[in-house]
Image (cartoon, helix red, strand yellow):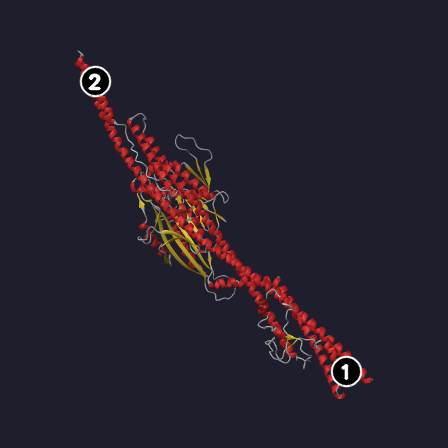
């Protein structure tokens, strides 16, 4: 987390006479109001502290070195950076950003510095692209290509927020960039106002995208990650200045520009206000309310190192604006950004990183569960070898003994019938003499693959019953194709092992078992890997889902706020117009006052109708045609005049009957003349007032036209937002479906792993029990042989 750096710069006074009369005092990093407006008391403790405060003697070079240089250097290292100038009109923003011939500004110095840094770098190579745009009357224009106008802002996961269609020039020297900037400046909107002979009428954003990657070292060392590509963006912004229409004397085009400038700066102020509230209280940040805040979104509370230079004018007339700028700067100071290097991993770098991760995971696994498993497998393998050796020993012993017997039988002739009977009866008693499962000689299907010799078959350890094995298919799969023909398992009549398996064969058998165990281990490892992969995928999908949910809730909130905002803006304009009227009309008894109060009523009516229409339109209701209401603007003047003439005529009739009618008549005529004159004068004034009110009505009409346009814009935004919302909902649903199916797959996989483990354990068990069986049978057999030889010995001696 990193705080936005904020500095204040005081411009030198325009006229030298103001030099000693500055109301602001700069003291180190502190600026304070030390003299109030003439005739007003000094407000208590109006003092502000910032990262830097530059007084009027400060040069652009100091501003750059102290405020921006570090950010520019960080941009070369892969961090995003933004520097912008904020302040009222004519306070010195353009001077700070662009500078002059003798004292180049921040943009010029940043460009030079970036190329000096990149050229000096020995271990990374760079690709630099530049673009230059302006936001004029809330439309984005490309300053490199005049035809590229009204560009749109888009957002994507890969590129973040970007302006579609903006020309980006690949550059390789500072001189080339400065030339391009000069070309761009020609297309920028400047205009003359009362405050500034060359006032910026648009916000400009000069952007440098710096990509870099490590120079190929040819090393295969996975511990270095130099293959990662850094992509950083530097925005150098010269904002248009806030202005009071009364001061700038703007009208026509300038007025329209001024309104757009003020509106977007007001939204910037709102964004800064919200961000300065702190993470908990801030709620929704209205970045989308203007193109400027949308483009600067990463710089305000996002992933960028940001510096703001707030420029102020020292003159007494600008005290209020200066206070406003300082308050803006104080709030901006509280904002923290979350800064990190922007890395893109190439395939090679990704491979390196993944190998490292795999290596780490393997080590972790080896250190935990896998180690235990491996040890268990080794122990089992040793036990198996031990059993095999014992079996061999017994078999050899048996063979030796039977060989001895055979030679003794051959020497002594055939057995007597009775002896034979004893042997047979023993055999019958035990079923098979050696009690080993052998195979029907004909189909010879069981354990075909594993047998090295058909006459000395090997045995596949069959589970006792399939109930022990969780899944039959899994068991067959595990058995590696050794399909058991269960019918073929039977106890054949006594069949002696003709020869003892050679040491080599036993070894082969061990190798076979070992390979099998290895194979199983590998399968197990693969299953675990796949499980981990699915878990990661699931995590990513969950992340994406959360992000989309956030977006949706943001859009919903915005859609809810729109009608309210529209209503507020209508009301504000209304109030502004009427307060203008109020100030215009001094005498509230004159005809003009009456006229204006009628006009006010009319406008109020128009505004409320407009407001109602807007809310109806926003609610999606159909506007019902209202009956035309005729409103008379003025009280009927004709009626009054007729009344007056009628009164005069009556008087005249009376007077003719009077003797002194002549004197009275002349007096009356004089009076009428005077009245006529007054009326004419009044008429004149009224005509003038009418003219001016016509002009005002015209202005009002223009205002309402603007409002209508704004309304249309807002409606368009609403419909766009709804469309986006719908598409986001669809996307979200799809992702949820994918997520569900992934979860299902994972469950299957886990189930399979479980079955596999059960089957594996059962197989181990059956192997062990087989060996125990085999061993006990051999021992029985040996005992029997010993017994029979004892018997035979007895018979012979008899
Ligand atoms: N620090 C400074 N030193 C010398 N002259 C300055 C300084 N700051 C501003 N000026 C001069 O003041 C005038 C107005 O400055 P500038 O055009 O930069 O203001 P601005 O804030 O960009 O205004 P606008 O918002 O209207 O574009 C220019 O003539 C400029 O040269």
Q: Quadrant of residue 252?
A: top left
Q: Nearer the viewer, residue 118 or 241?
A: 241
Residue at 44% x, 33% y is: 43
Q: Nearer the viewer, residue 22 or 508?
A: 508
Q: Nearer the viewer, residue 642 or 533?
A: 642
Q: Which of 241 and 575 is in front in this view?
A: 575
The residue positioned farthest toward the right in the image shown: 798
- Image quarter for ligand 1 equals top left
Q: What element carries label 2?
A: helix
Image coordinates of residue 134 in percent, x first then y, are 35, 49
Left of 557 or right of it: where is 448? right
Residues at circles 1 and 2 in contact by the CB criterion of under 8 Å: no
Residue 313 in sight: no
Quadrant showing the C terminus: bottom right
Give the numbered dot on residue 419. Answer: 1
Mark with earlier residue (1, 2): 1
Left of 68 or right of it: where is 535? right
Between the residue at mark 1 and the residue at mark 2, the CA separation in whole angstroms equals: 172 Å
Image coordinates of residue 535 in percent, x first then y, are 54, 58
Image coordinates of residue 38 in percent, x first then y, are 39, 31
Residue 337 in sight: yes
Image coordinates of residue 176 in percent, x first then y, are 35, 57
Residue at the disc numbered 2 = 650
From this view, report whether residue 297 is shown above or below residue 761. above
Q: Quadrant of residue 157?
A: bottom left
From this view, report whether residue 296 is shown above or below residue 647. below
Badge 1 crowding class, 10 Å Cα cut-off, few under 14, some 14 to 19, many 20 or more, is some
Q: What element carries label 1?
A: helix
Left of 497 or right of it: where is 221? left
- Is disc 1's CB within 8 Å of ligand 1? no
Left of 664 or right of it: where is 776? right
Q: Which of marks 1 and 2 is in front?
A: 1
């Amino acid at each position: 987390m990193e705080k936005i750096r904020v500095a204040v710069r005081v411009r030198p006074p325009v006229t030298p006479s103001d030099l000693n009369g500055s109301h602001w005092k700069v003291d180190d990093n502190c600026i304070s109001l030390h003299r109030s407006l003439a005739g007003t008391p000094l407000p208590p403790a109006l003092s502000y502290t910032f990262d830097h405060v530059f007084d009027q003697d400060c040069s652009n070079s100091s501003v750059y070195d102290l405020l921006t240089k570090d950010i520019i250097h960080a941009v070369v290292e892969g961090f995003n950076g933004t520097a912008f100038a904020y302040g009222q009109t004519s306070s010195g923003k353009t001077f700070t950003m662009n500078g002059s011939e003798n004292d180049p500004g921040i943009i010029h110095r940043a460009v030079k510095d970036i190329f000096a840094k990149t050229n000096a770098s020995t271990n990374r190579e760079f690709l630099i692209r530049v673009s230059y745009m302006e936001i004029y009357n809330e439309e984005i224009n490309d300053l490199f290509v005049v035809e590229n106008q009204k560009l749109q802002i888009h957002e994507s996961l890969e590129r973040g927020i970007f302006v579609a269609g903006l020309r980006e020039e690949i550059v390789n020297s500072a001189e080339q960039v400065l030339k391009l900037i000069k070309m761009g400046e020609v297309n920028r909107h400047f205009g003359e106002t009362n405050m500034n002979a060359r006032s910026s009428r648009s916000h400009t954003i000069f952007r440098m995208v710096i990509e870099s990657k490590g120079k190929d070292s040819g090393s295969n060392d996975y511990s270095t990650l130099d293959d990662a590509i850094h992509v950083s963006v530097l925005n150098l912004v010269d904002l248009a200045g806030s202005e009071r229409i009364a001061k700038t004397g703007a009208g026509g085009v300038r007025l329209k520009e001024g309104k757009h400038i003020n509106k977007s700066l007001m939204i910037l102020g709102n964004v800064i206000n919200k961000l300065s509230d702190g993470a908990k209280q801030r709620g929704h940040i209205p970045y989308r309310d203007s193109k400027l805040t949308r483009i600067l979104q990463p710089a305000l509370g996002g992933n960028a190192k940001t510096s703001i230079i707030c420029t102020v004018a020292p003159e007494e007339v600008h005290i209020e604006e200066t206070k406003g700028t300082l308050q803006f700067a104080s709030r901006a100071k509280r904002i923290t950004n979350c800064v990190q290097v922007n890395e893109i991993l190439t395939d090679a770098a990704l491979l390196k990183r993944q190998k490292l991760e795999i290596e780490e995971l393997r080590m972790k696994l080896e250190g935990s569960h896998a180690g235990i498993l491996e040890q268990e497998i080794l122990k089992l393998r040793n036990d198996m070898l031990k059993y095999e050796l014992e079996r061999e020993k017994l078999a050899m012993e048996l063979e030796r003994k039977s060989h001895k017997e055979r030679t003794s039988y051959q020497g002594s002739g055939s057995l007597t019938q009775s002896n034979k009977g004893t042997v047979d009866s023993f055999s019958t008693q035990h079923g098979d003499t050696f009690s080993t499962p052998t195979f029907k000689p004909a189909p010879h299907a069981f354990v075909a693959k594993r047998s090295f010799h058909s006459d000395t078959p090997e045995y596949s350890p069959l589970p006792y019953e399939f109930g022990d094995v969780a899944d039959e298919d899994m068991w067959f799969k595990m058995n590696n194709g050794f399909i058991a023909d269960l019918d073929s398992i039977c106890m054949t009549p006594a069949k002696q092992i003709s020869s003892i398996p050679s040491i080599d064969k036993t070894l082969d058998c061990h190798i076979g078992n070992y390979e099998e165990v290895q194979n199983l281990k590998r399968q197990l490892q693969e299953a675990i890997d796949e499980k981990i992969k699915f878990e990661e995928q699931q995590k990513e999908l969950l992340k994406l889902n959360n992000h989309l949910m956030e977006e949706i809730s943001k859009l919903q909130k915005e859609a809810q706020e729109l009608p309210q905002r529209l209503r507020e803006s209508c009301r504000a304009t209304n109030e502004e117009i009427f307060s203008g009227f109020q100030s215009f009309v001094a005498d509230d008894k004159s005809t003009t006052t009456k006229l204006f109060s009628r006009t006010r009523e009319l406008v109020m009516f128009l505004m409320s109708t407009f407001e109602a229409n807007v809310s109806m339109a926003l609610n999606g209701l159909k506007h019902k045609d209202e009956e035309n209401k005729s409103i008379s603007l003025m009280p009927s003047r004709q009626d009054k005049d007729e009344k007056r003439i009628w009164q005069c005529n009556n008087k005249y009739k009376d007077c003719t009957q009077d003797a002194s009618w002549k004197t009275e008549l002349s007096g009356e005529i004089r009076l009428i003349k005077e009245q006529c004159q007054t009326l004419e004068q009044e008429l004149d004034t009224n005509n003038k007032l009418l003219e001016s009110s016509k002009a005002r009505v015209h202005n009002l009409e223009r205002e309402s036209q603007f409002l209508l346009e704004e309304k249309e814009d807002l409606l368009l935004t609403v419909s766009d937002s709804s469309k986006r919302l719908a598409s986001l909902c669809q996307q979200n649903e799809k992702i949820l479906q994918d997520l569900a199916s992934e979860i299902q797959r994972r469950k299957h996989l886990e189930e399979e792993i479980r079955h596999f483990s059960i089957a594996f354990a059962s197989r181990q068990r059956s192997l062990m029990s087989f060996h125990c069986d085999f061993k006990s049978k051999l021992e029985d057999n040996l005992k029997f042989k010993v017994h029979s030889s004892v018997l035979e010995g007895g018979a012979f001696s008899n």
